[in-house]
Every structure is written in structure tokens, then in C-alpha cells.
Image (tube, rainbow, N blue to C red):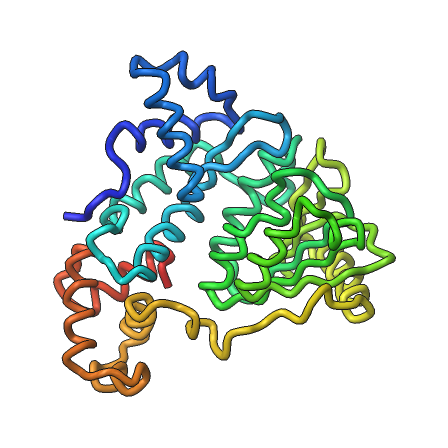
Amino acid sequence: MGIRIFNQQTEEVYRALLQRARWNPPDLVAQSPRDDSAVVDDICALQNSRMVAPSADEPGYVRAIEPRLALPTLVARQFKTGDSSELVAAPQLIQNVIEQHEGFTSIAPGWHVGGLDRAAVLVERLVATGRRELIFATPVYTPHSFEHAPYIAELARRKGMKVKMLWTAALGFLPALNAVVQELMDMGCEIRISKKLVDRAVIVDRSVAIDLADPDAVHLHSHEDKVTQLSLRSAELWNSARPLRRAVYADTPRSALARHEMILGYLAEGMTDESIASKLEVSIRTVRSDIAKTMSSLDAKSRFQAGVAASRIGIV
């Protein structure tokens, strides 16, 4: 059986947070029969694990990060430590949480909402299913916006997506973003500064675009003309913009990942133990030991099942 990082009470807090776009922590505390400090501690633990983020719309409020993005990223982070005993949960449980939550909030082309917190739901789901490229065009700074959130870049990087962030100079040299800039670049994001940036948008795989021009009326576009228009404008500005700093890219999408996570990726591709050992330059015995631990953590009865489970929940 899968092992949870969080106890039942902390999981209940996360599920409660998912029921609204944002929460004022005292309101959540008031609803719980538990000790006030215990609920606050749970919220802090969830924030530290990037399951919860501060609201971009209401100072002091918090919101739950979408489980389709947050849970696989958390599991992958545990694989990086090489300690499979700390995995968040069995793959089927993760899938159940995602399906139960998303059943209440379907999203389709033409979907529109008010506020950056609700827009974050859309962006997080699209990034979780993206494949090639993620572009942020951000001319203005909003504290705690998903537009410069490392947790989104973390997932995109693991999926092998290119992450491009087009900013104005006001953002590039903002003290509040200094630490964020370093973390984003460490993840392989490329940030460029444009003097002519006007559009505020997110473009995923050049197939869908989220128009953030008016944060109170955010729109999802999948119409070819609108997406192409935004993509072409961002590409032109990108080519003429100057890098904030040269981003250091990994040789391959997996080269910066821990051995356990890399092995999962190779299992999903159907590689043999010998081929994996050769790729990683370790012994076959080491590979087989890691595979055994990985299969146990994912409740898999075979190496094939482990690869499939990892792909299904988004670890690889």
C-alpha cells in the first residue's frame, strides 16, 4: 500500500481548501473542530510542500494548488531524495483525488473567470497536460501570481517542456523577485526583457492561450486565429528581447533528475535493466535494487506496471 507524507488531518485540510478559489485561514480554522494551531500548522506544511499558495487576489488568503499539478510534482520531489519510503500515496489514490476534484470544475474552450486565483486553476491543469512549450508574457507584477511561480516551472521542466518568460524591465529588476528569478533559472527557465511587451497571456504548446489582459475577465482561447495571433506577437518580441541572464539548460530533460526518477522514465519507455545501467553508468545490481524499491512504492507488481503508473499520474 502507498505511504502518505501527510496525516489524515492534513489531507482533510487540503481537500477543504480545494472547495473554494481561496480561503481566509481564520475561516478555515473556525470550521474545524481541531485545535486552531494544528490547522494553521497543516496549512503551513502544505505551503512548504507547494500544495498551497498565497492568493494573488486577496492579501492574507491562501489557495490550494490543483492536485493534477501538485500531487505528481510532490511525488517526483520525493523520488529525487532517493527515499521511496516517503512517497505521498499510491498512484490510484492520487488519480482518485484528481478525478474527484476535477469532476466539480470542468473547463472547456471559451471558459472565462474573474481573478488570478481562478485563472491559476486553468493554467495549472493546462501545464499538467502540456508537452512542448510554455510561454508567459507578463508586463506587470502581481504578488503571488502563478505567472512567476517556481512550482509551475518545476512540473514543466520534468516534462521536458521549454519554459519561456517574457517580462518588462520593471519585473526583471524587482527586488521582490530576486530569489524567484534564481530559482526559475536553476530550473532551466529562460527569461527575457522586452521594452514593447503589452500582452498579458499564457500560451501552452501554441495550441491554447489564456488571455490575462483583464484579470477580472480571464479568457481561455483555443480558436486558431486568436492563439496564432498571440503566439506570433510573443515570438517576435522574444526574438528581439534581451536575456535577463543566460539560463543554464540541462543536456537532456532528465539529466538533472535523481536516479530513481530517471529509472522510472526509462521503465516507461520499456528499456531493459542492462540498457538502463549503461545509460546511468551504474551496475545492473544497483538498477534492479532501485526498480524493486520503486515497484514497492508504486504498488506495482511488475516493472511494466511501475512505468505505466508513473506515466499515468505524471511523475514522468
Instruction: Give the side of residue 156 with respect to residue 82, left or right.
Output: right
279 displayed left or right of 171: left
> Which residue is painted at 31% across and 28% down in the image?
12
**In the displayed structure, does residue 54 sit left or right of residue 86?**
right
Residue 292 location (% of width, % of height): 14, 67
The extreme right residue here reads 196
Residue 285 position within the rendered picture, expressed as x and y whole percent measured from the top left: 14, 80
Quadrant in the picture for residue 77: bottom left
- Between 83 and 157, the one nearer to me in the picture: 83
Instruction: Tell me the quadrant of the picture where the C terminus can be found.
Output: bottom left
Give the x, y percent position of residue 306: 22, 63
- Percent position of residue 59, x then y: 62, 26
Image: 150 above or below 143: below
Report the residue at 40% width, 43% height from top: 49
Above or below — where is 287 with respect to 44? below
Foreground residue, 94 or 189? 189
